[in-house]
């Protein structure tokens, strides 16, 4: 185990999750389905961004699907997740629908934010998504605030903050960690370390590669895990969630993964002097979906034809969602000032 404070290790009592066999067959198939849905939806969104049918800025989640799938399957429907500018995967894995997602990307009134939020402001309170925000590190205090409310209400719910490696360099990250630890808040901090804050690599921003130590100064149990191994992500996330739900406070997980496309937009970004093509190709070979596919085939939990049929089914659902979005109306002009000020 890679935890830094054994005395408060939330996973010590969760030995059932120590191996891949701890994730049952049905859940493995569900994890694969969620990751595949995220991947195919993002690939379609990339095509729409390339043709300019989607006009808002789009931050694609391609390559990071294992983190959202592994974490969200460890949560109850009522548990809250707070996402970032790169949250299509969080939205879909927590239960958000394809139709409201694509309608929002196209700015339609049937979108999850009624066409007012675009790609970066997604919401569906019915499945525990109070909202996503493009402000770097903003998901962190929002999740802590929800966790404080949950604790005061004694409702047994857990809040999760998703954020990137760059967010750990913001003051509000450290301020929130202090309060979460002191108040034993039922919150889980999920750092999706994709090694780039916008266009600046982690190695140029930190003296050491030690993000996994982020919780140590605050006595928050922390771990570094393979963010491309969805079974490992799920096991650690489930243990962290149980730790929070039982009243023992927050945890911090550094999930090491990689975004395939550029910081924003569909471009691959390897010809811009930012990333080397060899680096991207190395991570492409570590595709989290393909890794799980191989395990499912080896364990005879799925067949090649099952996977082909599933991809076709998901693609049909995506095309249905896109057709729905295209046929939906734009918000009416006379509603322009709705939801801007308090309405009395």
Image (tube, rainbow, N blue to C red):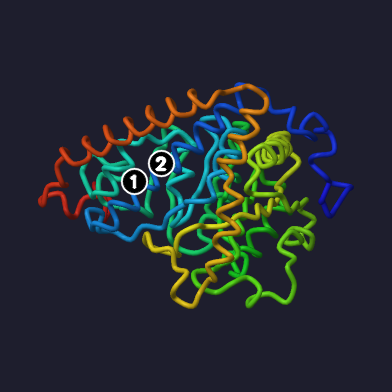
Residue drawn at x 44%, y 37% is 37
Name the one closer to the observer, 175 or 22.
22
Which residue in the structure is indicated by mark 2? 40
Dot 2 falls on a residue whose secondary structure is helix
Q: Are marks 2 and 1 in contact (CB under 8 Å)?
A: yes
> Between 304 and 136, which is closer to the camera in this rendering?
304
Image check: 268 left or right of 49? right
Splitting the image into 4 quarters, where does residue 295 fall? top right
- Secondary structure, mark 1, is helix
Residue 10 in the image: above or below residue 217: above
Q: Locate residue 184, reporting x and y percent.
A: 72, 47
* Residue 151 visible in the picture: no
Is residue 166 shown above or below 101? below
Q: Residue at x 54, y 33 (%)?
A: 32
What residue sits right under mark 1 in the picture?
A: 44
Q: Residues within 10 Å of mark 2 (few under 14, many from 20)?
A: some
């Amino acid at each position: 185990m890679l935890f830094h404070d054994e005395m408060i290790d939330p996973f010590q009592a969760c030995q059932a999750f120590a191996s891949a066999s701890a994730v049952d067959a049905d859940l493995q198939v569900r994890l694969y389905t969620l990751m595949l849905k995220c991947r195919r939806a993002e690939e379609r969104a990339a095509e729409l961004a390339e043709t300019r049918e989607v006009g808002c800025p789009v931050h694609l989640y391609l390559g990071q699907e294992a983190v959202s799938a592994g974490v969200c399957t460890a949560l109850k429907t009522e548990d809250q997740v707070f996402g970032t500018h790169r949250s299509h995967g969080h939205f879909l894995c927590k239960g958000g629908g394809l139709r409201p997602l694509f309608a929002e990307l196209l700015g339609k009134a049937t979108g999850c934010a009624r066409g007012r939020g675009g790609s970066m402001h997604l919401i569906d309170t019915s499945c525990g998504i109070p909202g996503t925000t493009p402000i770097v590190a903003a998901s962190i205090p929002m999740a802590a605030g929800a966790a404080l409310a949950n604790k005061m209400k004694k409702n047994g719910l857990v809040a999760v903050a998703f954020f990137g490696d760059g967010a750990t360099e913001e003051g509000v990250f450290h301020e929130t960690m202090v309060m979460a630890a002191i108040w034993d808040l039922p919150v889980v901090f999920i750092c999706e370390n994709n090694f780039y804050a916008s266009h600046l690599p982690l190695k140029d921003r930190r003296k050491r590669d030690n993000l996994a130590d982020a919780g140590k100064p605050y006595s928050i149990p922390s771990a570094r895990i393979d963010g491309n191994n969805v079974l490992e992500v799920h096991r650690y996330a489930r243990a962290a969630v149980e730790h929070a739900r039982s009243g023992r406070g927050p945890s911090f997980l550094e999930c090491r993964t990689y975004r395939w496309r550029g910081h924003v937009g569909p471009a691959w970004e390897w010809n811009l002097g930012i990333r080397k093509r060899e680096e991207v190709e190395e991570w492409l070979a570590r595709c989290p979906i393909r890794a799980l596919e191989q395990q499912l085939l080896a364990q005879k939990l799925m067949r090649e034809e099952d996977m082909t049929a599933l991809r076709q089914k998901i693609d049909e659902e995506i095309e249905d969602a896109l057709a729905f979005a295209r046929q939906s109306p734009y918000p009416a002009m006379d509603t322009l000032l709705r939801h801007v000020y308090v309405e009395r």
